[in-house]
Amino acid sequence: MPRSLSPGLRQGLWPFGFLSATYFTHIGFFNPYLSLWLQDLGLGVLAIGALTAMQSATRLIAPFLWAWLSDHTGQRVRLMRVGALTAWVVSLGFYVSHQLWWLSWVMVLMFIHTSPLMSLSEAAMAQRVSVGGQFDTQRYGRVRLWGSVGFLVTVFLAGAWFERHGMADFPHWTVATLAAVNLAVWWLPNQAETPAAKNLAGRLGPVLRQTPVRWFFAAMFFHILAHTSIYVFLSLYLDSLGYSKTMIGALWALSVVVEVVWFYFQGRWMHRLAVGTWLLLASALAVVRMALTGNAGDVLWVLALAQMMHACTFAAHHSACVQWISQSFPGPLRARGQALYSVMGYGLTGVLGALGGGAISQVWGMAVVFQCAAVSALVGLVCAWRFGLAQAQGHQAG
């Protein structure tokens, strides 16, 4: 933590760091290896794509509903505790049956209760790391990096474990990591917030109708849509190319190492460029990253280079988005602003990316999925350029 933080604020941020670490410890094994576990159960690519899409499908509605409930009750931490505990209980269903219909219900119920955790936590943390109304990217990065560390450790250890013992232990990992998430949410300070006024919902519309806001969400949507090829299909793609599970884990870990480094030092760099410029740079590198992955995935050093671009295409992009949303959706609107980021960025994109990518891979192969992702990133680049223009015009008009 930066020295400028007071002891009280520093103590208040550590629980958020622990929650970030445990949540992404869960994500660090679940997302990269879910598709391999489902494949080990004998499911086809379309079924795997449909099941993985359920995580994103729940993000179309659940985060915003939980954020609305949080804003109107002021009981954000209690809601997070209920969600985490329910998700853990539901995850025990993986021991009951591996039939497709049963797995579908277990995953839907589990994702409904895990999907809002980070958007609610990000909204609370964004307020705590802001100084004088300005979002402090250094403080945010020093907290958020613990999530990256959790992801890094788990993706590497899980890859080695599954390589040696097979995929049968996947349910054990799910239950254990969700138990850790429950410990984290119970450590958060249970401070009730002032409930939002009844007319708060009416204040959201004018914000969403602003031209820069529309271009921002469009740029973010197409940028993250491109990344669903990584999140959903990278492990299957690398497995089809003959990479071992240990190497798959190592390549995932490489992307997270550069992510951790970026989050730690981003306070030195983020203020040097405007948000629109960061979005442009991230999308431009995303085009290169997806093209390299799809066209040279069998060349290890090229694939490693592509994974290292994660520092900008994810970490810098994510911090820029959180910063902009925190400033553009102020006060009680912040939770719903973060929820919209989750819905548009990791809900709708995940559904379209998983289902569309599954269909594309069935017909043209895995490599084409990443080539299509490069096109999506290119569209995001154009939208980011329009976002920057809209912001500049708004500043001139002001």
Image (cartoon, rainbow, N blue to C red):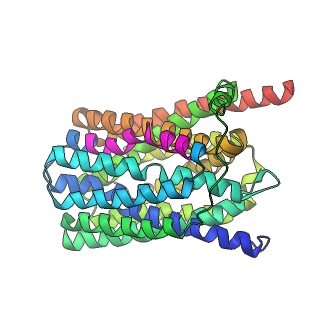
Q: Is residue 210 above or below residue 38?
A: above
Quarter holding residue 67 = top right
Q: 264 and 277: which one is in front?
A: 264
Instruction: Give the position of the C terminus as an image quadrant.
Output: top right
Place of residue 99 in the rendered image (x, y in percent of width and height, measured from the top left): 13, 49
Does the magenta portion include 86?
no
Place of residue 272 in the rendered image (x, y in percent of width and height, measured from the top left): 78, 51
Q: 211 and 119: which one is in front?
A: 119
Q: Is residue 176 above or below residue 335?
A: below
Residue drawn at (33%, 66%) of the image: 247
Place of residue 109 in the rendered image (x, y in percent of width and height, measured from the top left): 31, 48
Q: Is residue 305 above or below residue 227?
A: below
Residue drawn at (27%, 64%) of the image: 244
Can the viewer see residue 254?
A: yes
Residue drawn at (23%, 32%) of the image: 363
Task: Give left or right: position of 339 versus 299.
Answer: right
Q: 231 and 248: which one is in front?
A: 231
Task: Give left or right: position of 368 versus 137.
Answer: left
Can the viewer see residue 278?
A: no
Q: Which SS type dominates the magenta stretch?
A: helix
Q: 241 and 283: which one is in front?
A: 283
Looking at the rendered structure, the number of numbered marks drawn on it comes to 0
Task: Give left or right: position of 305 versus 265.
Answer: left
Instruction: Give the position of the N terminus as an image quadrant.
Output: bottom right
Range shown magenta: 50-70
Residue drawn at (21%, 58%) of the image: 94
Quarter holding residue 214 = top right
Does the magenta portion include 69?
yes
Q: Is residue 236 above or below residue 350?
A: below
Quarter holding residue 52 = top left
Place of residue 326 in the rendered image (x, y in percent of width and height, measured from the top left): 68, 46
